[in-house]
Amino acid sequence: MLLKNTWNEFIKILSKPRSYLGVGALTLLIAIIIFAMKADGKSIISFVTASFEQTLTFNGHILNGYLIAFIILQMLIVHVPLLVALVTGDLIAGEAAMGTIRMLATKPISRTNIVLSKFIAGAAYTLFIILWMGFLALFVSTAIFGTGDVIVLNSDGLVILPEADVLWRFGAGFCVAFLSLLTVSSLSICLSAFAENSIGPIVATMAIIILFTIIGSLDVTVFDSIKPYLFTTHMASWRSFFEDPVPWSAIRESVIILVVHNIVLVTVAVIRFNKKDITS
Amino acid sequence: MRKIAQLFLLLALPLFTGAQTADDVVSKVLTKLNSVKDYKVSATIKANIPMIKILPNEATIYFKQKDKFKVESKGITILPKQGFTDINNFLAKKDYIAVINDTVTTGGVKTYLISVIPNSAGGEMILAKLWIDPERSVIMKSQITTKSNGTVTTSYTYGDQVKYGLPSKMVFEIDIKKFKLPKSVAADINKSSAEKKKKAGNKGTITITLTDYAVNKGLSDSIFK
């Protein structure tokens, strides 16, 4: 029954125009980035290497598809949560607003399973978004720009990763990025269980992400104790796969914290939905 | 009168003893370098720079007189901006004053330490210090100070191509104090300011091992386009 209901939930997601809005926006954004890189990529790259180029010269195929894919991921991972929340924030509250939630509750399925099926359907949509982003970022970029070594700039300096050592990093990075977005999906479903209309959970999800991101970026010692527990701190963990050596313990910690967030948020959503008065 | 005579004798001493002047030493080096019309060489480039992590890489270097220079590599390679052709170009202009400062042993070889100062202040070069082996007429070490790129010290090791003055190994020591990361790009919210302030040393090295020279085989200009 859970699987059947999950399938129904997924069909509901597919039947809403807003689900395609996210995919369309993502496609347009990536197309714009690829066009910008094709038109003026070299000057964008020199912005990164400028301070080194006083003393050094960089030779080789720097502006390649792998680098573009990395840039796309870095630019969009901030905005994709909105596209996910736009759909998942509506899953429970949307039904409450339309009144269909009562009909749903008459089915021979527990309220817990209703929430779980919505969570699984939301996860499937999130996975689709990530796969679509991966396809456009990686395959379309490499088809246009070719492959090559990747220059990554982080706070410690430049890391130049050889071409042969890049694909697994993208694969692992996409997996952690999926987990990050799944947390956003769970948060919006959880908030959705408390709301009677879908706007509230979507706006609240984005407000929480913005608030946590600002707290995480403020270099103030008073926040140091809470920063490691904010899920936004770990949303950029996919980037760690592009460090050398890979900080496995930090990645493991991020994955654990994101998984715990997901469990807690879904549990809260289940408890809340089980107690929710849907008769009035 | 006696003092003037003593000074004259002191200045003329190299002429009587057969010792070389700085110009002689430098011009012999230049003659040797000019005997190379073009070359192609395989290079293994290993960069050890505190703010840059890169694995050793293979490349092919092409050079053609007067200043055509190209590096071809499958992956990304990092090379010092100056050091390959700068000395040749600078010395070829013959617009400098060369002075022997000292006799120094570098890498087990007795060398003249010669300071080369440009006559005109308009150029990029401020000062070049050259450690020259007078026996083989090759540069064993150089220290070039330029206006925009700071100081780069290079050590040379020679092999089969010593007759052309072409090294088999070059070690560049680079000053990285000027390196600054763009804050907006390098922002890493997961690292505290204390972590970000952890800095490595101020010097980096690039070691280039050169093998399989093909000298004066006549390289086409199209390679450098």
Image (cartoon, rainbow, N blue to C red):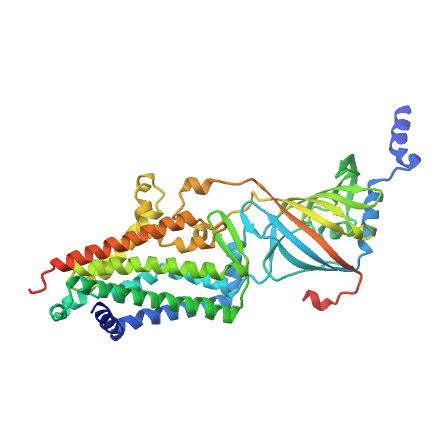
* Residue A144 image position (x, y, % from top left): 51, 71
Spot occupied by residue B225 in the image (x, y as percentages of width and height) = 67, 67
Residue at the left extreme of this rendering: A280
Which of the 4 quarters of the picture holds residue A100?
bottom left
On the rendered image, what quadrant is the N terminus of chain A found in?
bottom left
Residue B93 in view, yes or no: no
- Point 31% across, 39% down: residue: A222
Which quadrant, please, contains the C terminus of chain A? bottom left
Considering depth in this image, is A242 or B173 the residue closer to the camera?
A: A242
User: Residue at the front extreme?
Assistant: A1
Side of B171 relative to A47 (left or right): right
* Residue positioned most to the right: B16
Residue A227 locus on image (x, y percent) = 32, 45
Please state which of residues A125 and B66 is positioned toward the viewer in this rendering. A125
Q: Residue at x 91, y 24 (%)?
A: B2
- For the view shown, which residue lies furthest in the bottom direction? A15
Q: Residue at x 38, y 70 (%)?
A: A27
Q: Is residue B62 above or below residue B206?
A: below
- Left or right: A66, with B87 as reference point: left
Up-down: is A181 above or below A102? above
Q: Name the foreground residue: A280 vs B28.
A: A280
Is residue A126 visible in this depiction of the protein? yes
Q: Position of residue A191 (x, y in %)?
A: 20, 58
Number of dots carrying numbers: 0
Does A97 sit left or right of B104 as displayed? Answer: left
Q: Residue A224, relative to residue A49: is it above or below?
A: above
